[in-house]
Amino acid sequence: MKSGFIGVIGKANAGKSTLVNVLVGEKISIVSPKPQTTRDAVMGILTTENYQLVFVDTPGIYKSRTYLTDVMMKTTETAAKGVDLIMFVHDGHGGVSESDTALMKKYSSLGIPMIIAYTKTDIMPKENIVEDAKKLYEAGIVCDVYPVSARKGTNVNKLLNALVNAMPEGEKVIAEDIVSDKSEKFMLAEIMREKILLKFDKEVPHGIAVVINKFERMENGVFYVNLDIICEKASHKAILIGRQGAAIKEVSSFARKDMEKFLGGKVFLTTYIKVKEDWRDKPGLVKDYGYDVKKD
């Protein structure tokens, strides 16, 4: 049997979480078109009779601007060192730059086998794939490159076969009925944050944290979820609430529907919005909201 850990590394917005969700066959990580969507390392586990792949989806590599971003980058660095294979996810739609090849070389130099998942091929000219493959080769990138489209499913099976073949022989490391290492509370908070990311533009989503205060199943079978949405400015709170509360009602409705799908039952959701100025630069609050510094 093949079994091992795969570190999913790449720049912000490269399509890492979308690809992991497709490979695992379930929604493990939230997805949005904005940087910093994934803030923590999230495991997605794919188990069959013949293999078990443990994907470690990491925060996208992003120029650090806050203490929170420092923590996220530390999480990515740590995750990359404890795996059997690195799957470097590259946004093919964005071409290949010197900073891209420099990052690839950085992670390939760790001495861990690496392959490149070249994503978003469904929204780019096909001839660019050959040109970019040549650029990678000329830049000294010698690992295998797999052009894929997670959205269309193009070449995903080829990539999956390559991942399986690269794994060492071994027993399952995680029980076969587990698909993620994250708790239900974590996923509920992430679902709400995803809807905020999709609903609001510019700076507001980046300064958002979601804290689950209470999560329980009541006697009538309905799940009760009480949560706080943390933002950094009073003006952000006003935007989140919207005129006569319309914005928060809409985003909460979308979140509740996804929560019900995730939990398999009805959800009664209550939300509160709180302002904690510049919380992303305050280590105590960053830790309180679930984003602690990861140790080597």
Image (cartoon, rainbow, N blue to C red):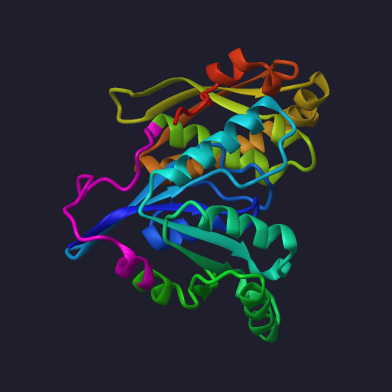
Q: Where is residue 90 in the image (x, y as percent from the top left)?
A: 60, 63
Main SS of the magenta part reads loop
In the image, is residue 96 part of the stretch drawn in magenta?
Answer: no
Locate residue 36, reporting x and y percent.
64, 42
**Quadrant housing residue 118:** bottom right
Instruction: Residue at 37% x, 66% y: name it.
Output: 163
As drawn, 19 above or below 245: below
The span shown in magenta is: 162-184
Answer with left or right where residue 173 lies relative to residue 258: left
Q: Can residue 47 be seen in this view?
A: no
> Residue drawn at (36%, 40%), measured in percent from left and top?
263
Q: Is residue 122 above or below residue 71?
A: below
Residue farthest along the right direction in this orientation: 235
Q: Which of 113 and 49 is in front in this view?
A: 113
**Residue 103: x %, y % from top left:** 63, 55
* Residue 252 higher or lower than 60, as above or below: above
Lateral position of residue 122 relative to residue 41, left or right: right
